[in-house]
């Protein structure tokens, strides 16, 4: 017995198309981020699931679109929703690492001490800003720990200027990346 999607009730078919599209686009969003971060195996596995689901959904829509053109609306809504769900999932998974750069003219030592006490490695650079001497504190940590690092920074100086970046490659030496389980204190490098 062959399954004919045209025989499914209106609402059920719309939900199947919508949620299938949400699933495959969410997987695709995470796959794309894994690809950019160079996570070969994760990108491979996610790509396999993504394209399998996509082929099933597109075959369903193409075969039934003449009889039920409203499926295109659910297909498009599933795509848009899948992008949002994929971004939310990726933020919760927090794959990879982050670089946090804190620039301050007055609270460098307090911020550095708070971060070091929190288990983060800190590298300090000295420079001159528009209004005089400034310090740049640089922290490389796992993305899942970025919120914790920012909270420590903002407890010392709620108005501090900071940047968050995503590196494409990070080379690690033991516990040097920082985080709650780090045992090595941060160093100071002076840039002139």
Image (cartoon, rainbow, N blue to C red):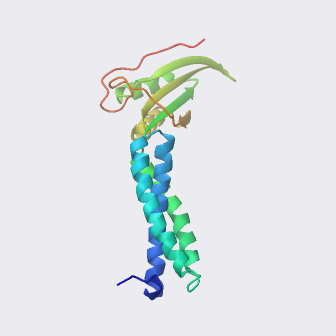
Which of these two is toward me, 112 or 45?
Answer: 45
Question: Height in image: 31 above or below 183?
Answer: below
Q: Residue furthest right?
A: 130
Residue 79, compared with residue 153, is above or below; it is below
Q: Residue at x 45, y 29 (%)?
A: 170
* Residue farthest to the front, as pictured: 1
Q: In which quarter of the view is residue 142 placed?
A: top left
For residue 131, which quarter of the picture?
top right
Provide residue 35's location: percent of width, then percent of height. 49, 44
Q: Residue at x 38, y 82 (%)?
A: 2
Whether residue 8 is visible to the viewer of this picture, yes or no, is: yes
Which quarter shows the N terminus? bottom left
Figure check: 155 above or below 68: above
**Toward which corner of the image does residue 116 lie, by quadrant?**
top left
Q: Position of residue 88 (x, y in %)?
A: 46, 55
Q: Residue shown at 48%/74% (left/top)?
A: 17
Q: Position of residue 107 (x, y in %)?
A: 51, 25
Q: Residue at x 43, y 83 (%)?
A: 4
Query: Who is closer to the viewer here, 87 or 2?
Result: 2
* Near-viewer residue (1 or 30): 1
Q: Would you say residue 107 is visible in this rendering?
A: no
- Return the residue nearer the eye: 96 or 75: 75
């Amino acid at each position: 017995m062959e399954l004919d999607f045209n025989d499914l009730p209106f609402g059920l078919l719309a939900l199947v198309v919508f949620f299938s599209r949400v699933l495959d686009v969410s997987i695709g969003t995470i796959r794309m981020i894994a690809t950019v971060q160079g996570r070969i195996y994760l990108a491979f596995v996610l790509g396999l699931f993504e394209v399998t689901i996509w082929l099933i959904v597109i075959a369903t829509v193409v075969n039934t679109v003449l009889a039920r053109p409203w499926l295109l609306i659910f297909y498009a809504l599933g795509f848009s929703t899948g992008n949002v769900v994929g971004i939310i999932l990726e933020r919760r998974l927090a794959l990879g690492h982050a670089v946090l750069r804190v620039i301050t003219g007055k609270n460098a030592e307090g911020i550095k001490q708070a971060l070091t006490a929190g288990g983060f490695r800190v590298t300090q650079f000295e420079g001159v800003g528009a209004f005089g001497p400034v310090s740049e504190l640089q922290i490389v940590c796992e993305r899942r720990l970025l919120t914790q690092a920012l909270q420590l920074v903002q407890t010392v100086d709620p108005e501090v200027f900071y940047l968050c970046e995503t590196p494409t490659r990070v080379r690690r030496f033991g516990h040097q990346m920082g985080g709650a389980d780090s045992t090595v204190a941060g160093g100071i490098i002076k840039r002139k």
